[in-house]
Amino acid sequence: MECSNSVTHHPTASSEKRKEKKRVRAADTLVEGLTNFADKLCHVMEKADSRMEFIGSRLGYAHDLSAARKSLNVVLLKLPLCPDDRFSAADLIMHDAQRIDFFF
């Protein structure tokens, strides 16, 4: 079969513009979608960061509370208390974290 006489299709300028516009619109949609995704990811990361800060502060508080409990007996030894009274005072103070904070 001879192809030299066959009709070839050359796209017109208007069809090329339509194709380009479609590509541009698809690219714009893709960019917009990626931008929205990035914004949402940033929001999630900010929330995670604030949660980690909260957890870190709670761990720090728990560590400080543990250190205060350990030093409670040393402080109570400085007071003129018999061992039974010192034990009762330590038991009352260590019963609640707010009492430990108040005592120190």
Image: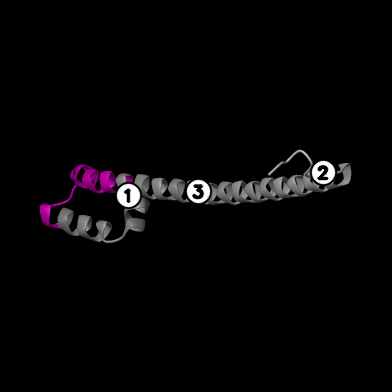
Within the magenta stretch, is there residue 78? Answer: yes
Q: Spatial distance from mark 2 to mark 1, Cα to Cα?
A: 73 Å
Q: Main secondary structure of the magenta part?
A: helix
Q: Where residue 44 appears, x then y in whole percent?
A: 53, 51
Q: Of callouts 2 and 1, which one flags the residue occurring earlier in the amino acid sequence?
A: 2
Regarding mark 1 in the picture, which secondary structure is present there?
Answer: helix
The answer to whether residue 30 is above or below residue 88 is: above
Q: Where residue 46 appears, x then y in whole percent?
A: 54, 47
Image quadrant holding the N terminus, namely: top right
In this view, the mark in front (2 or 1): 2
Q: Is residue 94 left or right of residue 81?
A: right
The residue segment tinted magenta is 64-84
Q: Of callouts 3 and 2, which one flags the residue occurring earlier in the amino acid sequence?
A: 2
Q: Which residue is mark 1?
A: 62
Q: Are marks 3 and 1 in contact (CB under 8 Å)?
A: no
In this view, the mark in front (3 or 1): 3
In this view, the mark in front (3 or 2): 2
Q: Of callouts 3 and 1, which one flags the residue occurring earlier in the amino acid sequence?
A: 3
Q: Amino acid at mark 1?
A: Ala
Q: Where residue 2 appears, x then y in whole percent?
A: 71, 41
Residue 50 shows which numbered tag?
3
